[in-house]
Amino acid sequence: MTSRLVIVGAAGRMGKHIITLVEKAEQFDIVAAVERADHPDIGKDAGVTAGLKPIGIALSGEFSATADMAIDFSTPEVADSTIDYCIGNNVALVMGTTGLSDRQYKKITDASAKIPIVYATNMSVGMNVMFALVAKAAAMLGEDYDIEIIEQHHRFKKDAPSGSALTLAKNICKATHRDFPGCLVHGRSGAEQPREKGTIGMHAVRAGDITGIHSVMYATLGEKVTLTHTAHSRDTFAAGALRAAQWLTGKKPGMYAMADVLGI
Ligand code: NAD
């Protein structure tokens, strides 16, 4: 069965990656490519904007009346209208946009009583596996191993530490009964800064065009274990979003995470 897709934020960096992958997949049909009404490419073919051959769908400010699923990688300001559209038209939703407010998080949670939703701020399959692994490693290694999280991103990234670094820390804290975020120590400087047992160091590097590297280091006297995830390109997030869309097809209403999609 072919799923009819609405891509929201279709001319954005993620939107273009997603259109490119969808066009290679057989089980999806793009029926609308939504962009802000004043985007300079409105009216142009969405495939051409993504660097492909024409796909016969023009970038538009309007959602499609009939669709099975929406994939939203846009901005938090757009999320409300995407959720309203999905509820109003019984359309499933893969929401990848980050930075939703608490009110929007509640709205999307309420919406999941009516429609199936995958919401994840990091759709990379490898990163979601790492979210699970870091908790297990922390619990297995025990309290004598100091934990430090080091994340690296491109020079344009606005927030620090990254949302994914915080999720890594949160999962470790849950597995080891640490206080989150109370046990986090962000960077270190100064003379009298001995390491306090049980804390987790958080370090953010911003340089060049690094897509995203997250390392969790567990070190004790005599050895060190390091788990690292490296995102080579945005394709990894787009591939995860499509995997989520495939998994979500035909699911009952509910709020699902990438862990559900991956069965971990
Ligand atoms: P981007 O700025 O390149 O793209 C956003 C697009 O949304 C732009 O083309 C913009 O014009 C469009 N937009 C703005 N207003 C709109 C409207 N009213 N209707 C429709 N489209 C509108 O950003 P990006 O790098 O593609 O990232 C988009 C979002 O996805 C961000 O929130 C980012 O943090 C998030 N993201 C999530 C993951 C993940 O794995 N979940 C991965 C990467 C990025």
Image (cartoon, rainbow, N blue to C red):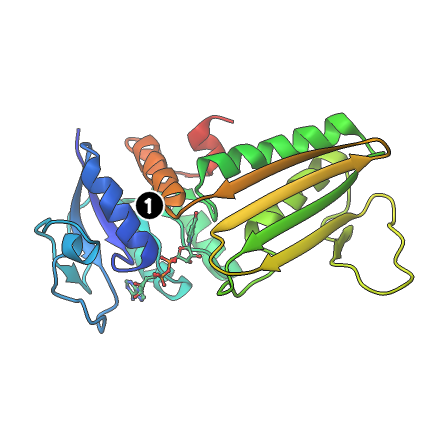
Rendering quarter of residue 68: top left
Disc 1: CA contacts within 10 A as few (<14), some (14-19) or many (>=20): many
User: In this view of the protein, which residue sits in the foreground, 101 or 192?
Assistant: 192
Query: Which residue sits at x=46%, y=56%?
Result: 98
Rendering quarter of residue 82: bottom left
Query: Which residue sits at x=49%, y=54%?
Result: 210
Residue on which disc 1 sits: 93
User: Which three-letter amino acid code belongs to the residue tagged 1?
Assistant: Leu
Q: Which element type, helix, strand or loop, lies under badge 1?
A: strand
> Which residue is outermost to the bottom?
38
| Location of residue 119 in the rendering, given as x and y in whole percent from the top left corner | 43, 45
| Location of residue 129 in the rendering, given as x and y in whole percent from the top left corner | 53, 32
Residue 160 in view (yes/no): yes
Q: Quadrant of the N terminus?
A: top left
| Location of residue 192 in the rendering, given as x and y in whole percent from the top left corner | 92, 61
Query: Which residue sits at x=68%, y=46%?
Result: 149
**In the rendered image of this protein, does residue 230 appear above or below residue 105?**
above
